[in-house]
């Protein structure tokens, strides 16, 4: 069971190695973890603070790293895409499976045409089109054809509340982008695909995965998506392939974001992130 990041992390930050940290974060008793996660995720100030610091660490690392490209998988309406382009100097390559996102992303491309590319396609372990549901209503509430669509349609036990139609959408393995020289040898990954993170990572291929300095990925510890919880599987896959977990937030109960960095570019956890210790004052969470 993936475990909680709390003040224990800060207390032994200065004296443990990355390898020790990555295992200890998973060691807490399952029931204790569930109680803490539920509490933190239910308190808006704590939840928002944790996601703020997670994104701050991501953006600070992106500025320090020599990565040339941010690969964003799951761009949705382009909210984070614009933030990448506004606040960072990296090129950005975005993927989004929803055909209705084209207008949003194309408007961004018109402004940042020298640094931004995108394709309307999903990412997985296959190169095949899929039937993608576009939801118009959920529990009698009308939805945008972009916002809310990608998350709700994969949830368990929601079909009886949905009105939707299906469109054929392309899905590719990300290794195809590397083969076509659309991505560089030094990248940063941002993955937000509502339950399909492991498939995205496997479709990159191990060789190409090692061309990524850092990975920010949304995962689930709750089994509320049709393909099951992904957190443990993603953690195991990345730690086996030279990546170490350095942060997690508390976006919501059962769904949160993890930040991994390539082990070979770090010396110790303390050396790499100790500058954040004095600044993080809003996460008042006792172990």
Image (cartoon, rainbow, N blue to C red):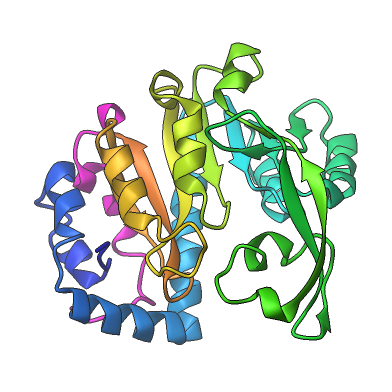
- Residue 190 is situated, as x and y percent measured from the top left of the image, at 54, 44
In the image, what residue occupies the spot 74% across and 85% down?
A: 139
Please determine whether, in this image, residue 164 is positioned above or below residue 267.
Answer: below
* Nearest to the observer: residue 64 or residue 251: 251
- In which quadrant of the rendered image does the C terminus lie? bottom left
- Residue 130 is situated, as x and y percent measured from the top left of the image, at 70, 42
- Residue 135 is situated, as x and y percent measured from the top left of the image, at 79, 66
Q: Please give left or right for residue 186 compared with residue 248 in the image.
A: right
Magenta stretch: give its range.
263-287
- In which quadrant of the rendered image does the N terminus lie? bottom left
Please determine whether, in this image, residue 77 is positioned above or below residue 141.
Answer: above
Q: Please give left or right for residue 56 compared with residue 86 in the image.
A: left
Q: So how many labels did they put on this image?
A: 0
Please determine whether, in this image, residue 178 is positioned above or below residue 195.
Answer: above
Residue 240 included in the magenta stretch of the image: no
In the image, what residue occupies the spot 30% across and 54% down?
A: 232
* Nearest to the observer: residue 211 or residue 122: 122
- Residue 171 is situated, as x and y percent measured from the top left of the image, at 67, 35
Q: Is residue 243 visible?
A: yes
Q: Please give left or right for residue 94 compared with residue 232 in the image.
A: right
Q: Is residue 78 visible?
A: no
Q: Please give left or right for residue 214 compared with residue 176 in the image.
A: left
* Nearest to the observer: residue 2 or residue 190: 2
| Quarter location, residue 72 | top right
Residue 269 included in the magenta stretch of the image: yes
In the image, what residue occupies the spot 81% across and 55% down?
A: 166
Please determine whether, in this image, residue 227 is positioned above or below residue 271.
Answer: below
Q: Outermost residue toward the front?
A: 160
């Amino acid at each position: 069971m993936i475990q909680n990041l709390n003040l224990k992390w800060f207390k032994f930050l200065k004296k443990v190695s990355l390898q020790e940290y990555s295992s200890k974060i998973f060691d807490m008793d399952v029931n204790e973890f569930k109680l803490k996660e539920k509490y933190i995720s239910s308190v808006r100030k704590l939840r928002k603070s944790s996601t703020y610091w997670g994104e701050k660490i991501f953006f600070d690392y992106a500025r320090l790293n020599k990565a040339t490209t941010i690969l964003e998988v799951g761009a949705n309406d382009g909210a984070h895409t614009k933030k990448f382009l506004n606040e960072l100097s990296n090129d950005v390559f975005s993927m989004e499976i929803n055909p209705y996102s084209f207008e949003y992303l194309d408007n961004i491309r018109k402004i940042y045409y020298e640094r931004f590319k995108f394709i309307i396609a999903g990412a997985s372990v296959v190169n095949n089109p899929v039937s993608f549901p576009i939801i118009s209503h959920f529990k009698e509430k009308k939805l945008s054809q972009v916002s809310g669509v990608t998350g709700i349609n994969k949830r368990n036990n929601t079909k009886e509340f949905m009105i939707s139609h299906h469109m054929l959408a392309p899905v590719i393995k990300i290794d195809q982008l590397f083969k076509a020289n659309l991505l560089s040898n030094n990248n940063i990954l941002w993955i937000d695909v509502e339950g399909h993170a492991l498939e995205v990572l496997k479709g990159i291929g191990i060789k190409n995965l090692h061309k990524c300095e850092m990975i920010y990925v949304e995962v689930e510890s709750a089994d509320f998506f049709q393909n099951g919880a992904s957190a443990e599987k993603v953690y195991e896959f990345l730690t086996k392939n030279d990546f170490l977990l350095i942060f997690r937030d508390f976006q919501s109960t059962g769904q949160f974001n993890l930040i991994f960095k390539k082990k070979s570019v770090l010396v110790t956890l303390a050396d790499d992130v100790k500058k954040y210790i004095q600044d993080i004052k809003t996460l008042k969470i006792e172990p």
